[in-house]
């Protein structure tokens, strides 16, 4: 079967260093080709090359063949990056469908068919909502429907199951399989071996920008093993409450009023302890973390730091309060300025929040980044030249430069391969123990939560169902 799209001998070089070197792959109709490998191995660079997108200043070699303009769709790791925050999902999809002409009925039928293929449950409710009112799994399916309506013959899915709970993850897997059954070629970028084994007809293994193996997933992927992670330790200090929420009821604003997303939640985190926050997509985990950090202020109740109320909005918080409570976003790409080097942006935190001079800040940034596995040479690049996993580690380093007392981590390990994830969790465990750092660890990864956390809070439909 001839490929629908093909990459041959791809080389992408930034500032004299290759991001990928000699990569080749073929995407065939109705089949799923997976690109696998650790964070920074070149998966996203290769996948985005099919869309004709490259990092700023990159030198490109090799050959890329696609069916033509607009024929390659993209499902990003963080779907909010391609959804218009000011438009409801239904209006967006109907406008795309209308571009092909036809009656209102024909336009509606095209949207309904795309939603069926994307296996979006309760589509009528979803179509009425804005992107920020949708769970991560719902956003992913809307983006898949968008690609289908645009007539994509090839879809590049970049870590589409990252940060999803097991039920939502399985739903996305089934949606992608259904898309392939329609004769569309899928290129799956993933570090999740279980997902690759379920979906891929062929796996291409990358390491340091080169292809090191290819073949059936079961043949080229290592057998799944239980990761070695830090284990919870017995408390060694008095349980003095550092941060807490009392009777927190949070809302999202809509065009028709407000929608409650958290209901009367009361929680506390002592100094030097880790509270994991788990639950299905859409259960309110991220909203809780954003309330702690001053990023969501539409709530009743109180957020207290060492017993004193914190201002609801980060704009009203002092520099000291901002430094004491730091937040690491699930989507690190959106949190960095594309036009400045990563090192400068990480170092800027110590200047802005701690008053450190430029040289001291850069030395601290280099040291912290290296502890998280990012060499200085790599961080001199702009964010677009780094992988999602590398950016996630940089986002963590930037927060740590503030020397916080409370760190809210929103799915920060979801974009990392197992070895890198374990190293990050071990680093966080060390900070918790040595510096009495309080951690709020929002995650779908129950293995990581069980290993790192002293207690786990479970949210369901915005309500706290258990905390122990």
Image (cartoon, rainbow, N blue to C red):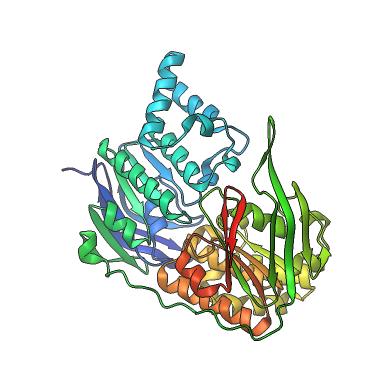
Percent position of residue 228, x then y: 42, 78
Rendered position, 272 above or below 321: below
Percent position of residue 374, x then y: 52, 73
Percent position of residue 392, x then y: 54, 64
Rendered position, 452 above or below 204: below
| Residue 300 seen in render | yes
Tell me if 333 is positioned left or right of 269 in this view: left
Q: Residue placed farthest to the top in the image? A: 103
Q: Residue shown at 49%/71% (left/top)?
A: 450
Percent position of residue 243, x then y: 73, 67
| Figure label count | 0
Tell me if 351 is positioned left or right of 375 in this view: right
In this rendered view, identify the residue nearer to me: 170 or 356.
Answer: 170
| Residue 150 seen in render | no
Locate the C terminus by quadrant.
bottom right
Rendered position, 48 above or below 255: below
């Amino acid at each position: 079967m001839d490929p629908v799209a093909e990459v041959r001998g791809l080389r992408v070089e930034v500032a004299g260093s290759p991001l990928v070197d000699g990569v080749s792959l073929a995407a065939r109709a109705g089949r799923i080709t997976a690109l696998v490998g650790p964070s920074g191995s070149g998966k996203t660079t290769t996948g985005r090359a099919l869309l004709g997108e490259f990092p700023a200043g990159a030198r490109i070699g090799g050959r890329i063949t696609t069916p033509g303009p607009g024929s390659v769709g993209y499902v990003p790791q963080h779907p909010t990056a391609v959804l218009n925050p000011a438009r409801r999902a239904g209006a967006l999809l109907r406008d795309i469908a209308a571009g092909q002409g036809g009656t209102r009925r024909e336009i509606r039928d095209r949207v309904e068919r795309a939603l069926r293929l994307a296996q979006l449950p309760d589509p009528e409710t979803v179509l009425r909502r804005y992107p920020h009112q949708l769970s991560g799994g719902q956003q992913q399916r809307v983006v898949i429907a968008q690609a289908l309506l645009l007539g994509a013959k090839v879809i590049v899915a970049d870590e589409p199951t990252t940060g999803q709970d097991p039920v939502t993850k399985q739903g996305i897997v089934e949606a992608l399989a259904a898309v392939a059954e329609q004769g569309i070629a899928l290129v799956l970028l993933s570090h999740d071996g279980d997902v690759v084994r379920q979906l891929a007809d062929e796996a291409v293994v990358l390491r340091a920008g080169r292809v090191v193996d290819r073949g059936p997933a079961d043949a080229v992927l290592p057998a799944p093993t239980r990761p070695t992670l830090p284990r919870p330790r017995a408390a060694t200090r008095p349980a003095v409450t550092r941060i807490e929420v009392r009777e927190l009821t949070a809302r999202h604003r809509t065009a028709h009023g407000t929608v409650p997303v958290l209901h009367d939640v009361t929680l506390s985190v002592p100094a030097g302890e880790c509270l994991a926050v788990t639950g299905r997509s859409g259960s309110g985990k991220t909203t809780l973390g954003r309330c702690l950090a001053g990023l969501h202020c539409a709530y009743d109740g109180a957020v207290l730091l060492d017993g004193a109320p914190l201002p609801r909005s980060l704009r009203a918080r002092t520099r000291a309060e901002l430094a004491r409570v730091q937040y690491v976003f699930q989507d690190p790409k959106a949190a960095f300025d594309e036009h400045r080097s990563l090192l400068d942006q990480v170092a800027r935190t110590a200047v802005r929040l701690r008053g450190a001079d430029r040289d001291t800040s850069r030395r601290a940034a280099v040291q912290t980044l290296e502890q998280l596995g990012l060499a200085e040479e790599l961080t001199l690049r702009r964010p677009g030249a780094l992988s999602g996993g590398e950016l996630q580690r940089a986002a963590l380093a930037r927060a740590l430069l503030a020397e916080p007392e409370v760190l809210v981590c929103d799915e920060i390990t979801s974009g990392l391969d197992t070895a890198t994830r374990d190293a990050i969790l071990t680093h966080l465990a060390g900070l918790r123990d040595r510096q009495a750092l309080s951690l709020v660890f929002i995650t779908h990864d129950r293995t990581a939560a069980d290993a790192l956390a002293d207690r786990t809070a479970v949210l369901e439909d915005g309500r706290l169902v258990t905390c122990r």
